[in-house]
Image (spheres, grey):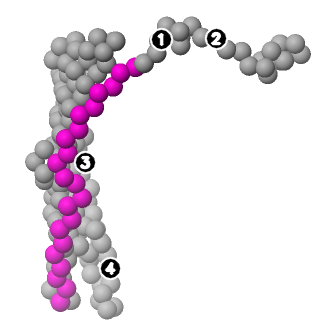
Amino acid sequence: MKLTDWWRTQNNFTYVRQKVRSFYLGVPIEQQLGIFSANSTHSFRLSDSFSAELSGFYNGPGFFGNARYDEFYAINLGLQKKFSEKWGTLKLSVNDILDSLEFNGGTDLPEQNIRTRNLFDFSNRTFTITYSRNFGNSELRSARNRETGSEEERRRVN
């Protein structure tokens, strides 16, 4: 969605009703939960040569088998500076700014005497700097016209 000439956004929202049915020692177990998730990306063109992007997501509590896991979320930021075509592009990004991306939860089934608690930290705050530049003669590449032997042979047959 284009909000202004310099600001674009894309947003997704999802709601899922999750039901888990299982058995433990022959005893049926059923759990259900409504799960909400959101994803949002905002792109900003600050000048002809400078742009930024802010993105984030949120996943509400959900099941993984009989284990119920808490919500998790992350926010990311990227900056880009384009120099002249001859000098390339410099990018800086930070993923998981709040260092919040953790999978935290467990199983709580007191009737079956089952209780677990887990914490998985699959991601850390990450900083990335990237410089890219095209090398070579771009005019030569676009003007190049190659002919293969099979094309020449097809012309002789026809």
Residue kind at label 3, given as amino acid type: Thr
Residue 14 image label: 3
Instruction: Give the residues in magenta.
Output: 113-134
Residue kind at label 2, given as amino acid type: Asn
First in sequence: mark 1 or mark 3? Answer: 3
Residue 126: image location, x then y, percent: 20, 45
Label 3 with label 2: CB-CB less than 8 Å? no
Q: Is residue 14 visible?
A: yes
Q: Real-space Cα distance between discs 3 and 4? A: 25 Å
First in sequence: mark 1 or mark 2? Answer: 1
First in sequence: mark 2 or mark 4? Answer: 4
First in sequence: mark 4 or mark 1? Answer: 4
Q: Secondary structure at mark 4?
A: strand
Residue 22 image label: 4
Q: Residues within 10 Å of mark 4 (few under 14, many from 20)?
A: few
The reply, left or right, for residue 138 in relation to residue 68 is right
Residue 145 image label: 2
